[in-house]
Image: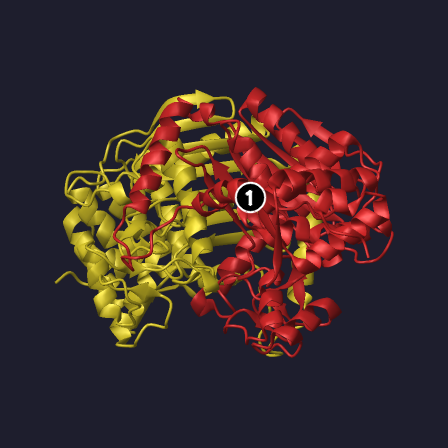
Chain colours: A red, B yellow
Amino acid sequence: METKTFTVEQVRRFVNDAFRGFGFTDEEAAKITDVLVTADLYGIRSHGTQRLVRYHKQIRSESIKVGVQPEIVFETPVSAVIDGHSGMGQVIACFANQLAIEKAKRVGMAFVTVRNSNHFGIAGYYAKQASDEGLIGIATTNSESIMVHTGSKKAVLGSNPIAFSMPADPVPFWFDAATTVVPRGRIEVYNKAGKPLPEGWAIDDTGKECTDAAKVLSCISAHQGGGILPVGGSREESGSHKGYGFSMIAELLSSITSGGATSNHHKRVAGAGAGSCHAFIVIDPKIFGDPEEIRAHLSEFLQELRDADRADPDVPILTHGEKEAASMEKRLKEGIAIDRKTVSEMVDICKDVGLDSMEYLGEPAE
Amino acid sequence: METKTFTVEQVRRFVNDAFRGFGFTDEEAAKITDVLVTADLYGIRSHGTQRLVRYHKQIRSESIKVGVQPEIVFETPVSAVIDGHSGMGQVIACFANQLAIEKAKRVGMAFVTVRNSNHFGIAGYYAKQASDEGLIGIATTNSESIMVHTGSKKAVLGSNPIAFSMPADPVPFWFDAATTVVPRGRIEVYNKAGKPLPEGWAIDDTGKECTDAAKVLSCISAHQGGGILPVGGSREESGSHKGYGFSMIAELLSSITSGGATSNHHKRVAGAGAGSCHAFIVIDPKIFGDPEEIRAHLSEFLQELRDADRADPDVPILTHGEKEAASMEKRLKEGIAIDRKTVSEMVDICKDVGLDSMEYLGEPAE
């Protein structure tokens, strides 16, 4: 794949000014930019700059509304329910998560749930915001239906990721995973490469296992049957009901607690917000004693996991978050490589919002 | 497998009087009995009466101590840390979970964490205690090392189950699953049947995938390498890091927050408690609005999942907890079938604690 490498500062400036151009305030654009660029820095390209073109379309079609404010519709000292009023997911999620962090600092733990939002980027961004402040952060969301639950041939559940972060040294424990066996982006990669999918990833609209990536993608888009399997595959033998269960936990914590749309009721039409629901749970380790002792206990345990006997002597054992921390370090030094297709989309966005693409990206507009 | 069927009342009376015979108070015996018999009623035999002989041995060798009380060593309005002082896991867990339920009713949500405990039975029992009171219940525990984490050939993590229950009609959502692809009991079943294990379940002490059930079991017992894989198998391609991550969440919530022993530091010697750690998180749906509306929203969603197009027209789609509710209904009517080996162990226990096995089980002592 041909790519062009930009400095992190270049990417930040472009994303920030694009969102200002879309009509967001400086403060909102800064928040959205940080979520997207963090995904690029972590190496999670599907949720970084590459996604800008989709957000752009949704903003233009008013599925994502500009100029609306998240509203607290119910509140207790340990909780809040937020109505996102179909605004930008990242703005709503930052607001909700910040509220959860403040409440947790005040009372020890808090749970803020959100309805009527849109795609919020990587769930792990919000969990990390909490762990950066010495807290335990849990973030989850539902999404457009994409997962066929055990025994079904129709996608009802979303990719429903769960993220968890907790302070540790040298890097925090940072886990962020879709509860599907793979995200849709991975199917797209196989499709582009013309490679058959591994067994246990997806089924088609007849309910049979399917390794044809193009067919699976068209099934997902058509919403008439077929989709990606839960982690654990299609059979109880491999733990299908477990991935299905974890996806349910994400759904219950987000859409059910918030009174919002479950994944199967997300909207996919111009002018209507998706209806995404999120949940942010924040816990202050002070409620269990000395946070420094807890942090040291976790750091020591993570080191024991890394030091365990390797299955393959040449492959180091990782704990969750190490890969992303290393990716960030590398990209901060070496810049962010963006594929040509995305660069050309970025040029189009410059044109649309009146930015000079030569100045921002060193690329002429067509 | 040859079995003998007992009425639920017979099983309850035997288990209760056996634990009284082991030295537990009436109140403690009643709690332990309810956890064990519930597992039998749910059809989770590995955690029911069948396990009595192991508990008996651990009580006799003083790994499980009789006559100790769980102690609150740290407390806030939303939390507590409990030291179990190596008592019976079920007694400690009932105490801790009850405290979490009371706190959640008072302040909206609560997190009680436990160290120095022993095996506590099915995690889902405690989650269900919360949902029976109209609350959301989450329960988890670490355990003896049995899971080889991604890239490792040494078992460091436990089976680390996560349970989640939330009120719904006609039955609550009730999820309880080990974060290993299968529990050890399932490997034992394959071993007894002389059948090879499916791919993706286990590795041996050389770090290679292993389908020889006997070898895997001996590896687990020897603690020198090999064990059961996380849900998601051994490769990132099938989501290995996801099962590993969910297991880590169980570990962090239990042993790290409580300052207790992580799974790899559990003890397996006479006279020392295992050091198991548990976590109980309880959330009152009132903190999100009207609990009845939330319950109705969940019930409706569960019905949509059941009503989805089936992959196989003859196989109904289940939501989590339906199978267990049906099993309970059936066994309350038809009784609990117990295998002959367990029955003979029960007769031995009668003899040991001075119960008349003919009266309790209709079986003569040898």
**Residue B13: percent from left, percent from top:** 33, 50
Q: Point out residue B113 in the picture as x, y percentages from the top left corner.
A: 41, 33
Horizontal side of residue B169 vs B182, given as left or right: right
Position of B295 with respect to B94 (left or right) is: right
Tell which subunit mark 1 falls on: B
Q: Quadrant of residue B187?
A: bottom left
Characterize the local packing of mark 1: few (<14), some (14-19) or many (20 or more) Cα atoms within 10 angstroms. Answer: many
Which corner quadrant of the image does residue B63 belong to?
Answer: top left
Specify the amino acid type for callout 1: Ser
- Taking the spot 55% from the left edge, 39% from the top edge, the residue there is A138
Residue appearing at x 60%, y 52% in the figure: A45
At mark 1, the secondary structure is helix
Q: Residue at x 73, y 38 (%)?
A: A16
Q: Residue at x 80, y 44 (%)?
A: A356
- The one nearer the camera, A95 or B25, is A95
Q: Quadrant of residue B309?
A: bottom right
- Kindly identify which residue carries mark 1: B131
Query: In the rendered view, would you say B59 is above or below A203?
Result: above
Q: Nearer the viewer, residue A144 or A35?
A: A35
Would you say residue B304 is visible in this rendering?
yes
Q: Position of residue A80 (x, y in %)?
A: 68, 31
Q: Which residue is nearer to you in this view: A81 or B320?
A: A81
Looking at this view, name the residue that lies furthest to the left: B366
